[in-house]
Image (cartoon, helix red, strand yellow):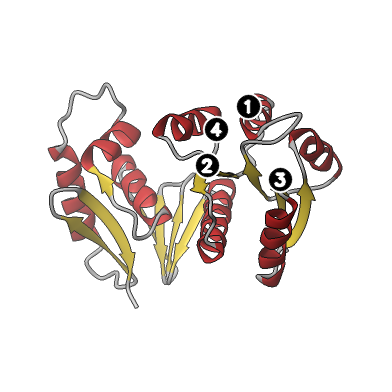
């Protein structure tokens, strides 16, 4: 069972989020501010933290900064009434993994928590399974029905990225910056070339597909 820490000084909202998370099968711990959250984290294993920004004693920004400075990779979902781009930018630069603006839609909260936990598990295990296909990050292999194929590094990284976030659209520029690096001399057509190679290589795979999103980039979708 995953353990979620809810850090929120609004007691009513804290109780509501905790109740919804418990109903979804999570073990939930709570704290009213950053200092209390640090005490909980010292005493208990936590898989993910949902954290308000505006809190007494220690706010969410400072808490996130301290945790990232200590090299923890705990997934953090910030929840706040502040919705300007500068606020979001500050949160992401300090190390939050996702961001929600109040009033909170509880169904969306549950979806985001589940997505963050899935990504954290992928990052830790360095393996990704979609249907009967398994990707091994350390070996750069794609395995299916007992047969393993080693992919060229860039093709593997591109496929692993897209499948780690099913349904999410990535622009060619985003993919270039992450996989080839922002200083790469290749242009964005390089992504198109590698996607074509992947499609040719994965012709018989029917559990997912790489889709072109016209004018934007690419996404991976699982097939029903």
Q: Quadrant of residue 21?
A: bottom right
Instruction: Tell me the residue that label 2 is attached to.
Output: 97
Mark 4 touching mark 1, by CB under 8 A?
A: yes
- Mark 2 lies on a secondary structure that is loop
Dot 4 falls on a residue whose secondary structure is loop
Which residue lies under the disc numbered 1?
A: 65
**Residue 168 at x, y = what percent?**
34, 54
Left or right position of 178 against 75:
left
- N-terminal label among 4 and 1: 1
For label 4, the residue is 95
Q: Could you tell me how far apart the alpha carbons at marks 4 and 3 are, in whole angstroms?
A: 16 Å
Disc 1, disc 2: CB below 8 Å? no
Q: Quadrant of the N terminus?
A: bottom right
Q: Quadrant of residue 212?
A: bottom left
Per the model, the C-alpha gap separating discs 4 and 1 is 7 Å
Q: Secondary structure at mark 1?
A: helix
Neighbours of disc 3 within 10 Å: few (<14), some (14-19), many (20+): many
Give the CA separation, mark 4 to mark 2: 6 Å
Task: Identify the mark nearer the N-term, 4 or 3.
Answer: 3
Residue 61: x percent and y percent? Answer: 61, 30
Residue 126, visible in the rendered structure: yes
Up/down of 182 relative to 175, above or below: above
């Amino acid at each position: 069972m995953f353990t979620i820490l809810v850090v929120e000084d609004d007691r009513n909202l804290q109780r509501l989020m905790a109740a919804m998370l418990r109903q979804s099968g999570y073990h939930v711990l709570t704290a009213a501010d950053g200092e209390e959250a640090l005490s909980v984290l010292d005493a208990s294993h936590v898989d993910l933290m949902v954290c308000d920004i505006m809190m007494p004693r220690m706010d969410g920004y400072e808490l996130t900064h301290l945790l990232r400075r200590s090299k923890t990779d705990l997934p953090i979902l910030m929840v706040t009434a502040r919705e300007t781009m500068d606020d979001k930018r500050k949160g992401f630069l300090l190390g939050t993994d996702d961001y929600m603006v109040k009033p909170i839609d509880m169904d969306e909260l549950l979806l985001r928590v589940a997505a963050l936990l899935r990504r954290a598990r992928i990052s830790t295990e360095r393996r990704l399974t979609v249907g009967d296909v398994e990707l091994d990050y350390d070996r750069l292999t794609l395995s299916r029905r007992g047969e393993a194929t080693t992919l060229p590094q860039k093709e593997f990284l591109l496929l692993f990225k897209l499948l780690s976030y099913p349904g999410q659209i990535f622009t060619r520029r985003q993919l270039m910056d992450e996989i080839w690096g922002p200083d790469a001399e290749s242009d964005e057509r390089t992504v198109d070339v590698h996607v074509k190679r992947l499609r040719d290589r994965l012709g018989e795979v029917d559990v997912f597909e790489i889709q072109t999103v016209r004018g934007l980039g690419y996404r991976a979708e699982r097939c029903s």
